[in-house]
Amino acid sequence: MTPNTTLVFEDGHRFDGASFGAVGERIGEIVFQTGMSGYQETLTDPSYAGQIVVQTAPHIGNTGMNTEDEESVQIWVEGYVVRDPARRPSNFRSQRSLDDDLVASAVVGISGVDTRAITRIIREAGAMRAGIFPLDGRTTEQYLTAVAAAPVMSGRNLSAEVSVTEAYVVPAIGPSIGVLAVVDLGIKNATLGYLASRGFDVHVLPQSVTLEGILAINPVGVFYSNGPGDPSASGRHIEVLRGILERRIPFFGICFGNQLLGRALGFETYKLTYGHRGINQPVLDKRTGRIEITAHNHGFAVDAPTEGIIESPSGFGRVEVSHVGLNDDCVEGLRALDRPAFSVQYHPEAAAGPHDSTYLFDEFRDLVLRSGGAT
C-alpha cells in the first residue's frame, strides 16, 4: 500500500493510509464505534452527523450495502476510518459495495491504518477534532491549522441539519390507538416501525415544530428521537417539552430525547470523555434487576443522582433514574413519577441488534392507554 491519505488529530497524532470512499478533505469530532456488525445502520444514523467514525472491528464491508437496512435517506458520518475494507462484498442481501456507497455520498474515508492504536488515543485522551486529508505536500502543522479552525461538538445544535423540513405520516400497523407526535431530531427508520407496530399513527414533525403545532394534531403522546449535537444548545426543544409535561401528555424519549427530558426536568447534562458507541453495552434496569445488552450512540449524558427518588428542579415532581450503565454508572434512563414521562439513553430500536429492550415500546403504549388514549 502506498499511502495517499492522512488522518490528523488536533493533539498532533497522525496516521497515513489509503483512501477509502470519496477522495477529499473532511474535519469532525473523531469517535470510535465498537459494533462488529451493523456498519450500514451506523453510517445512516443521523446521530453521527459531524463525526468521523472509527470502526474498532478490523474487517468492514464484508456484507455490502442494501436499501432495506438504511436508517435514513443518506449516510451522515463526516468521515470513516477502517483497518481492512472488504475487497468485495459477500452476502445474499448485498446490493452494492460499501466503497461504492461512500463514493456516491461523497463520504471521505481512510483505510489501512491501525484502528486499535487510534481507539486507544481516543480512549485515553477523549473525543477530539480530527481531519482526513489527501497527502498533497502539506506539513503536519498545516493540517493541524485546518483542524483547529473547525468547530468543537460542545455547544453545537445539529438538529436542523438532520431533521425533516416537512411533516409526514407513518400509519399505524393494525388498529390505531391515536396520533403520536414524533419530533424528528435525527430519527431512525427502525424507530418509526416499532412505534407504528404498537398502533400509533406516527406524525413525524420537523425539529422546528412549536408546542402549538404539536397540540394542533391532538396527540395521545409525544416522542423525542435520537439526534446529534449538544443538548445544552437545544433550549427551544426543552421549553416545548416542558409544555408537554405541564399538560401531562405521555412522553417517551430516546438518546438525545433522554438528555432533553433530563434538562426539561431541571438536571444538567455533560460531555462524556469519549462517549458510548456500539451494540454491546450492559445496562441495569433498576426496577427488575435485569441486565440488558444495548446499543448506544451518545457523547453527552444526564447529570442526576442514580440512587433514590429526586425532586425535579423544574417543579415536575418526583423523578428516578430507571437505568444505569454498568461500564461507568452513567444515567441510562429517567422516569417521572408524577408525570406520564420516561426516557432511555440507549437505543431499544437497534435494527442491527441487540433486541433486549424493545419492551420499552410496549411500556409506552401502555402508558398512553392508561393516560386516556384510544383503546
Image: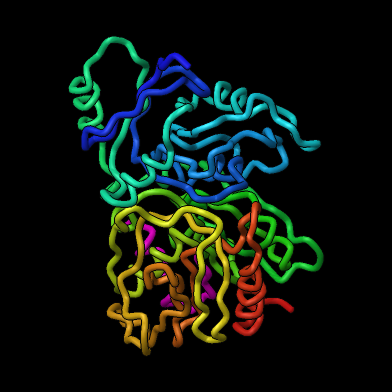
User: Can residue 194 be seen at all in this image of the molecule?
Assistant: yes
Q: Nearer the viewer, residue 289 or 308?
A: 289
* In the depicted structure, whether residue 16 falls above or below residue 261: above
Q: Residue at x 63, y 82 (%)?
A: 372
- Residue 272 lies in what quarter of the image? bottom left
Q: Nearer the viewer, residue 185 or 327?
A: 327
* 39 with respect to 8 (left or right): right
Residue 90 belongs to magenta span: no
- Residue 266 lies in what quarter of the image? bottom left
Q: Position of residue 148 (x, y in %)?
A: 20, 32
Q: Position of residue 126 (x, y in %)?
A: 29, 50
Q: Nearer the viewer, residue 261 or 166?
A: 261
User: Can residue 242 be seen at all in this image of the molecule?
Assistant: no
Rendering colour mode: rainbow
* In the depicted structure, whether residue 121 falls above or below residue 28: below
Dominant secondary structure, magenta: helix
Residue 237 belongs to magenta span: yes
* 11 with respect to 373 (left or right): left
| Total marks placed | 0
Q: Position of residue 345 (x, y in %)?
A: 46, 65
* 348 with respect to 170 (left or right): left
Q: Residue at x 49, y 58 (%)?
A: 296
Q: Position of residue 169 (x, y in %)?
A: 66, 52
* In the depicted structure, whether residue 96 falls above or below residue 343: above
The segment highlighted magenta reads: 234-253
* 230 with respect to 297 (left or right): left
Q: Residue at x 28, y 62 (%)?
A: 270
| Quadrant into which the C terminus falls | bottom right
- Seen as rendered, the residue at the extreme top is 137
Q: Nearer the viewer, residue 271 or 247?
A: 271
